[in-house]
Amino acid sequence: MLFYPCTWSYTLNYMGLRSDDQPLGSYRIAELMDRDLSRPIEELVKVNNADPDTVFTELTEYIATDRIKAEYERLFSLMAAAPKSPDESVGVWIAGFFGSGKSSFAKILAYVLANREVRGATASSLFLKQVESKRVDESVGFLNRAVPYEIFMLDVHADIRVETKGEPIVEVMYRVLRRDLDYSEDYDISELEIELEKEDKLAAFQDLCRAEYRDEWRKVRQGGQKFARSSALLHRLDPRTYASTDTWLNMVKARPATKLSVGDLVERLFDLCEIRRPGKAFAFVVDDIVQHVELDGERLENLCAVVEQLGKVSIERLKAGKIPGPAWIIATAEETLDEAYNLLAVSRIGLPKLQDRFKHQIDLSDAGIREVATRRVLRKKESQESVLRKLFRERGASLMQNVKLEQCSRRTEFDEDQFVRFYPYLPLLIDLSIDIVAGIRLHPNAPTHLGGNRTIVKQCFEMLVSDRTRLAGQPVGALVSIDKIYELLERNLPLAKQKDIRDIRERFDGDKDYPGMAARVAKAICLMEFAKADLPPTTENIAALLIQRVTEAPPVLAVAAILHHMRDAHFARWTKDGWQLYDLGELGRVAAALEGLKNAVGTVNPRLPGWHNDLIQLFKKTLARALTWYTRPLQEFNTSVSRSLEKTVWAIDHLSTNTVAPDHLSTNMVALERLSMDMVALEGRLARLEKRNATLAESMQEQLELLHEQVKALVSSHKTANLEAPAGRMEADGDMRAYENSRFYIDTGLGNQRTLYIIGLFGTGRRYINELMLHNIGERAKYFRDTIRFHPGPTPMIYSGHATMRHVSRAQELPAVMRRILEAVGSGFANLIFVYRHPLDSLLTNWIWWRTYIRDNRSIFGISQVYKNSDDLCADLEENFFDFNAFAEGDPDFFTGIPGPRFLSFAEFVEETELHLQSAALKLRLEDFMIDPSKEFFKIAEVMSVDLDLSRICVAPPTTKPYGYLAVKDKVPRFRNFIDGLNAQTKRRIEKIGYHLM
């Protein structure tokens, strides 16, 4: 929330005593605004967010433009007429670009159809006040009276599980319907509930559950023992049918997997609604449907089949008097139906059939999102409009001249009313912001999980109140410029782009003639590249978009001077399309295009069918085969070039990523120090070995030169990055003594020794194993390194670190690193030990570690450094459970402010553990060290083939308590619910790796 100085003039203005004759500089933009800026605006409307306050705000602040009002009139009229003249076309397709309001349109449509109560008022009454349409009023009134609806909201991102991405849409709909009608989401449990309900035994079954387990059935059916308990309850309820406590359980296990047809599942939708919502019709809202069917024609066919079947069954049941109105499926997408069809490129279903299923199409791309932004956020007080009108009359003509763009079709002119409505934006900047966000979303290197401020409504609000812009506190006359838009969109940009801007700012912002201008110019060029092609980033256009005040002339000379400096320093270049920042992405696109050109060598172009063309094709194919001796070397050469270019792109991109993220920079700095130490050790070792073996000395010299080159590269990388490494150190930095004693050793008498890798996921107790190694393996400890490196053959080295097998994760080596380790193991050069513990213990440890690291900028070695006892931990978890849940789900927003990839979600962590256990030669459970640490340590010694001095061995158990999550589970109900709610696949994996969810 912003707090503005309550000056005397500010107070007079709110009392209505301020004169329009006051100088403009004495007014602040906040004084002009009608909106209460302390009330935040949500960026996205989520159809399945039923929070009463959120829904109330969405309904009461809804802006129905003329276009939106017309679409509601058409759609509600159609739905009101449908019961008397039913049609099989029950599909509605709502299209619009990101931020156009399509999800809001669909959600409000659903709430009005269901006429749900929201904070003491009906959704319809709140909506009708905003729309003010007699036609909508009549249609909605009829539907609410005569055709009551039950609505099921389906958000593709939230309701389609990660492990079942291939799940047909009808099965997702059936699961969501069961959930909303208070059946179990588990198919087998819900089948049991439906069967008992038909026999009027469900209530008795639930009473028995309450008496037997002292808990409600709704909770029991979500737990890990739901099948066993259900089976036991059935035995108690009906011992004649279920002879023992595991009879039903065995029946479920023996039941063959059956897949119901679309027709069967649609019939069940109607049947269950008739049981639980008698007298009601129903409709589904499926938000972002293309995300589900993308690149899969079978899923699109399934969707069409569902719509077709819903239409047919609706007509049958309407005629039979079983339902008051047809069932609808309302889908939203960024693409129109035609665009979606072209994107999917399916062949088994034609566009006419798709259009027939979704006969009712709404495109909100031109529905007036600019008007929504101005009316909801930028609306001015009527008493203050005269201030802006006076400003326009005095400066409007010169301002329009100053912001005029060259070689561009974008409209830069505006009248007095437009100036008042859009201020502090200019109309041009609203449209440009929408285009920039669309371009960012299409960029191949944009972050997977984008940051905020992507919708123009949210951006307008943040432009006024954000700490990075604070335009509300600026004097009247200040304007939104393109570099201010960058400030709000920076988190959405590719990391390499963000780094480019930081480098330019560090390099040029101290310019004595134009301080601070270089970063503004770079930000303008960066965003202009994401806009449509009709905005060339020329010097004049950049200057026009950087105007910050109504009275300001475009800074053409300053922009030209800065661009000249940036060009000389190879940060920017002039092309036929205008100024551009140097972009590694262009190299990547060239490499991608090369693959297609390579495959085209020696191929025959297709021709239309017909005997004449068939003869020509036969001749061309014969000739192509005859020239194979000529084209084969070309293909091999092109393949080699393509592979080399791919490797080059990967290497440069990897280097760029490493220099962007502080985590990687910290790693580079540690590696730099270690390499320097290695060089010192190598030089000394080389001097001693020269007398013994000239050949070995030559080899050592080559390694020394290689290390010198690596040091130079890392130093160069460090100078380029200009970032500060985090003050805190991660667990991956390891034991300090191991770091201080790190040296590079080479021994020609290796015998049968193999390089040993000790791998553990973050938070599994690997550091404890490191301590044991350093204290108990004698001379071999000098070869220990708390890092990961590779060698072309066997060595006595011992490397320890974090690495993943499949998922990229913060603070853990990439899957490519593990692949190289496994290759070394497979070649017989190395051994692999994997350390693990109960995943739920690791989850709690990791949440606390990362939370402390982010919040306090410090590293910890154990939970005891943060909490005195488990009660303190439980209290903190209960208070901050949403923060914990975000971490467990792998939400990237948990790491806001720390560049780099996110950490593993809990499901991914469990999956990684399972994958590691399939590959390691020796698996070490941390809990086993708590029982008999000596026995477990001797397993390590056996793998290493190391002779131990038994008199000096001191193997203490770890200080951490095993299965600590159980105490937390007993004291924190929401943590217990989290465990019970884990998906079936994650639970199976936990059991497979040897643990139970007790």
Image (cartoon, grey):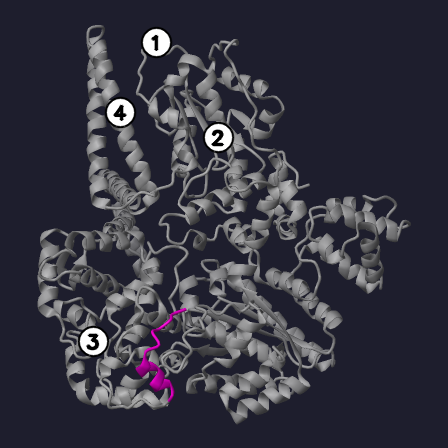
How far from the left and from the top, in percent, is residue 485?
29, 67
Tag 4, which secondary structure? helix
Q: Residue 390, relative to residue 293: is it above or below? A: below
409, above or below 251, in the image: below
- Residue 797, percent across and down? 38, 20
Segment tinted magenta in the rendering: 1-15
Instruction: Indicate which disc residue 766 carries.
Output: 2
Q: Earlier in the sequence, mark 3 or mark 1?
A: 3
Q: Would you name the residue on which mark 1 appears?
A: 749
| Residues marked 3 and 1 touching at CB (< 8 Å) | no
Residue 486 left/right relative to 570: right
Residue denoted by label 3: 549
Which one is earlier in the sequence, the residue at label 3 or at label 2? 3
The answer to the question of whether label 1 and label 2 lie on touching residues, with beta carbons closer than 8 A, is no
Q: Are marks 3 and 2 in contact (CB under 8 Å)?
A: no
- Along the horizontal axis of the image, is 451 left or right of 621? right
User: What whole-number distance in Å separates the C-alpha atoms at marks 4 and 1?
Assistant: 23 Å
Name the secondary structure under disc 1: loop
Give the residue pinned by disc 4. 677
